[in-house]
Image (tube, coloured by chain):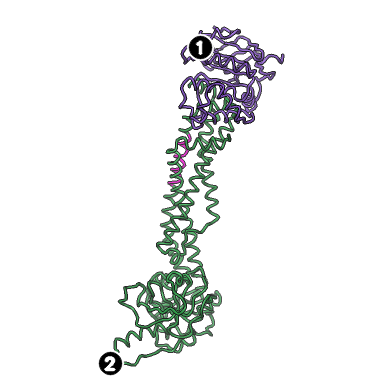
Amino acid sequence: MIDQILITKNLSKKFEDGRHLHFPDIELEKSKSLLIHGPSGCGKTTLLHIVGTLIRASSGTLCIHGQHLEKLEARKLDQFRGKNIGICLQKPVFIRSLTVLDNLLITQKLSGTAIDKSYCISLLAQLGLSHTSHQFTHHLSQGEQQRLVFIRALIHKPALILADEPSSSLDDHNAERIIELMQEHTSIHRASLIVVSHDARVKKYFNHTLQML
Amino acid sequence: MRVLHLVWRNIWYKPLRSIFNILLISISVALIIILLLINKQFGNHLGKESEGIDLILCAKGSPLQSVLCNIFQIDAPTGNIPIDQVKVFLNPSHPLIQKAIPFALGDSYRNNRIVGTTLDYFEWKKIDCQEGKLFSKNSELVIGAELAHKENISIGSVLTSNHGLIDLEGEMTHQHELTVIGILKKQNSIDDHLIFSPISTYWEAHESDHDHKDLDSDSSLHHQHSVLTNEELLLYPDHEITSVLIQFKGTNVQTLNFGRKINENSKIMAVNPPIEISRLYELTHSASNLLFWIAIILGIMSLFALIINLIQTMEERKFELAIMRISGASRLLIFIILILEALFICLIGFIIAFTLGHGILHIASTFFNLGNQYGIFGLVFYNDEFLLLILVLLCGVISAFIPGVRVFRQDIAETIKRN
């Protein structure tokens, strides 16, 4: 049981407009990757948000890292998310008043993990962003921003990384590069990776795919 | 990386907006600080200078002018009165009067007033010399500590006085030479800015002028005897003085009716300083009230501007706030960050206002002589300013409350979807 980083059962989400989405069950082992693939509007981002504890499911069970999260109070859920989950959003968003390095340091602070500046610098170096550490994030190129989003998701050493359409706005070369980087570094850092995408280009990089309709 | 660092960087990310907020707060709070300092100090000044003076006896005229002239030394005398008309009050054995201090006013040295009085004045106010001694004969002067410093006057300095309270470039200069023989200890009162002489010096100076004019017809100068006490003053009933300050032995029906009876039955005027001072305070108070309300309106405007700024900031940063929530920040922490931003802006605004308020008043006090005349200084601090700081910070918390509540209600997933 403890070898599973994520287990979901009978998850569903009922919206105010009456729509009711039912999601397939997921079991993901530690250090493994999973692609959730499907067309736009099938609910894959909603599933990602439920797994990322950003919204609560209307029914079903969600267990991450051995912890059942359905009834965890909001404050503890924030702490749990900060400590165990790293999320890469589709569009890069950063704290604009802070530099690249400060964005990473504040993420460590907010997640409740110890501040480790050298780790931030080493991750920036690993992903080829050393030169940007003292720049403001809006001065970075799109590819650099995408890589920085991933570094931020990794910076507090989470057990599970969730990425929402990481390749959708990138060309073939950069899409390939970011997926490879994610695979490589989640493996190095022994994290599990779930990528949600409608982009057929990324399918070939994953052994496990959950197809949603 | 601390949260305070983030707060600080957020404030200065859009500097113009923050500076506008800070300026609005600074101006309104500085105005309130200036009014506070003026009201407090002026009120204290009025109370301190008039302390122990129950009645002023002087020539008939404006009672307020009489108070301004005889207590605060900032207006012209209402006229002169013959000693004969006040001799009963100068009598040391008067049953109701504890102290009677005669004044002769109207002369000056470089716009600084010369007060002719008796030695009873120094005994009553418990003033000693820090250097030299009190006058013991005509043509001798003692001088206030501040004035001696300002005009660079020392023991042995010889001065010539002007007739009148304004220096008219020698046109009205008395021929009589006066020698400084004592410098008073600093009193932090109007006494620090005055020159004191025996009353008889006043008479001598004025008679000397007359004698000079009539020099051809009568070469013999008439020299007055020195008058140093009230008893000696009573020997000259035909001479004139400006006023007598009266302190009663106690308060009873007789003392309460004392002034009214004098006003009804004599040619001199009795003025009750507390009544005139409260009238003066009311006059100045209405002006300061107007300024106070302008400051309050400015303060309310700055509060609204701060609220609008924070709401706009929050709207612009909603995705950033969502990212912070995703990274593990609780709603409360985001709320606290927003409050800290408002508090920092208010604190910076207060510090600037504090510096501005005291600085402006200090400069005004120095240039316009507010300290000497009205007891108003810039570098004086009151506990009320600390209360004002608390109030300003409280306004900061209130202004952060509305955007803070919106942050509390923010749905992270919904916000991300809208990005």
User: Residue B57, percent across and down?
Assistant: 44, 77
Residue A177 covered by magenta stretch = no
Tell me the crowding category of disc 2: few under 14, some 14 to 19, or many 20 or more residues within 10 angstroms, Cα based: few
| CA distance separating discs 2 and 1 | 122 Å
Is there a contact, CB below 8 Å, between mark 2 and mark 1? no
Q: Residue at the location (54% across, 8% down)?
A: A203
The chain to which mark 2 is attached is B
Magenta span main SS:
helix
Q: Residue at the location (35% across, 81% down)?
A: B174
Q: Return the residue found at the far right.
A: A1
Q: Nearer the viewer, residue B257 or A165?
A: A165
Q: Which chain is assigned purple? A: A
User: Residue B319, percent across and down?
Assistant: 50, 26
Three-letter code for the amino acid on which mark 2 is drawn: Ser
Q: Hue of chain B? A: green
**Mark linked to residue B217:** 2
**Mark linked to residue A41:** 1
**Quadrant occupied by the N terminus of chain B:** top right
Secondary structure beneath label 1: loop
Q: Nearer the viewer, residue B359 or B285?
A: B359
The range drawn in magenta is B297-310
